[in-house]
Image: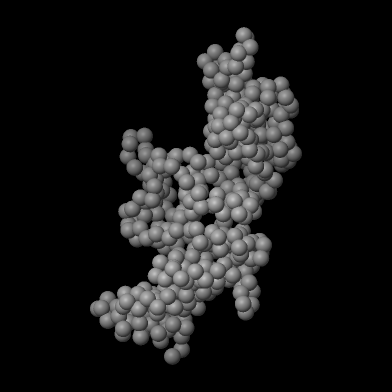
Amino acid sequence: MALDAQTASRVKDKAEDLFSKGKFSEAIETYEKIKAYGVKDPRINLRMGDIARKMGNNAGAVEYYKDAVSNFVKAGFIIKAVAVCKIIISIDPAQQEIQAKLAELYAGPQGAAGEAPAKPTAPIKPEAAAQPGGATAPSAVAPLKLPRVPLFSDFNEVEFLEVVKKVRSKDYPAGSYLFREGDSGDSIFIISDGGVEVTGQAKDGKTVVLATLTEGAIFGEYGFFSQAKRSTGVKTVSDSTILELTKADLDDIISRHQRVSDVLFKFYKERVVDRLMGLSAIFMPMSKEDREEILKRLTLVKAVKGSPIVKEGEMGDTMYLIKNGRVAVWVRDKAGKPLTLKEMCEGDFFGEIALATSRPRVANVSAVEDVELVAFSRPMIKDILIKYPAVKDTLEQVIKERVVDTAKAKERQDATLI
């Protein structure tokens, strides 16, 4: 039988008809005729595993699922491959080697991205097809050039295996909430199958849909990195398989593989900082490409509770974005006593005025709790001002507004100028 797409589709329809009638043996025998086509459509192998499991043939199901893992990776569906790995281990915990095989197939020797590959020959679009760049991964026979998947593609083989071991896969029926507004944000989620809605509360109290996410999408990263409460809710719009990585699990991996911390910071810059820059009046005029160049130059700074970050009177050569934690902006009143003007938290920028104008700092900033900050240096801002003169106008307007705010704030204790 010639295995072209039309033939495979016809045989699949026949197999599914048999399955719907409860004729599982006949269904799997029919699927066997197009098993080889699983290289192009790994869902065939996945479905065969599902049917074998339905028949109580767990050993057979595991073998079909292993084929699905290999073919999903080759087709560029790494998230689906991870989810199938978890099915295999749930059936037979002794099958741990499948995770190592997946890491060997997918992760590059340094976790480094290569050139963008051609689209894999698969009937559905890989979750990473829209991402720039690609990842080069070795196999036992020949190197595979696979689409880049955010976060996962930057791990080397050992790190990738650690992450795969930790990740959890869970099936959610349609209408299930993964989290609600106000919940703690300590997990990153990846959609393997299905879709979700991101919801929020309108001013009138009604729930509104802010976005719809489908296979391959990653969400929850803002709350994860900021350690803040969820600002939105997320619920499934169809039966879905979702992967979850918790902060505790990643912290455990970092304790043994420090480079994972660098990978996470890179992911944070790409997913969170870039978004915040795009929303900031200062960075809004910049193209995405220029923002990406700035992102490469950002560094992470940590400050412990009570420590000074910015001192009044010092020349400012750094602007900060709060990754997580809180800081206090304060000055001394006429009596020399500390006067708190404002507290700032995750997602807030500070220090941009002194940095852009070369004027001394006009307030102090101290860590209210342990805090992580993203640092923007003077050369970065200088480069931006040269290429985007409109940013200078924006800064001048911000300065005027904040000077007025500061004057008033010393009376009402609500300043915003730093």
The answer to whether one can see residue 73 in this image is no
Residue found at the very far bottom of the displayed protein: 1
Give the quarter of the image for residue 61.
Answer: bottom left
Residue found at the very far left of the displayed protein: 21
Scheme of colours in the image: one colour
Query: Which one is in front, 371 or 117?
Result: 371
Give the quarter of the image for residue 241.
Answer: bottom left
Would you place residue 413 above or below residue 278 in this image? above
The answer to whether one can see residue 262 in this image is yes
Residue found at the very far front of the displayed protein: 94
* Residue depicted at x 46% and y 85%: 3
Point out residue 294 in the picture as x, y percentages from the top left corner: 67, 45
Point out residue 317 in the picture as x, y percentages from the top left corner: 72, 32
Give left or right: position of 124 versus 154: left
Would you place residue 221 above or below residue 131 in this image? above
Give left or right: position of 191 versus 208: right
Query: Which one is in front, 380 or 320?
Result: 320
* Residue depicted at x 35% and y 78%: 57
Image quarter in which the N terminus is found: bottom left
Point out residue 159 in the picture as x, y percentages from the top left corner: 59, 60
Query: Which one is in front, 46 or 65?
Result: 65
Point out residue 352 in the picture as x, y percentages from the top left corner: 65, 31
Query: Which one is in front, 164 or 178?
Result: 164
* Residue depicted at x 42% and y 63%: 193
Would you place residue 240 above or below residue 31 in this image? above
* Residue depicted at x 34% and y 60%: 239
Give left or right: position of 58 versus 297: left
Would you place residue 327 above or below residue 135 in this image? above
Image quarter in which the C terminus is found: top right
What number of labels is visible? 0
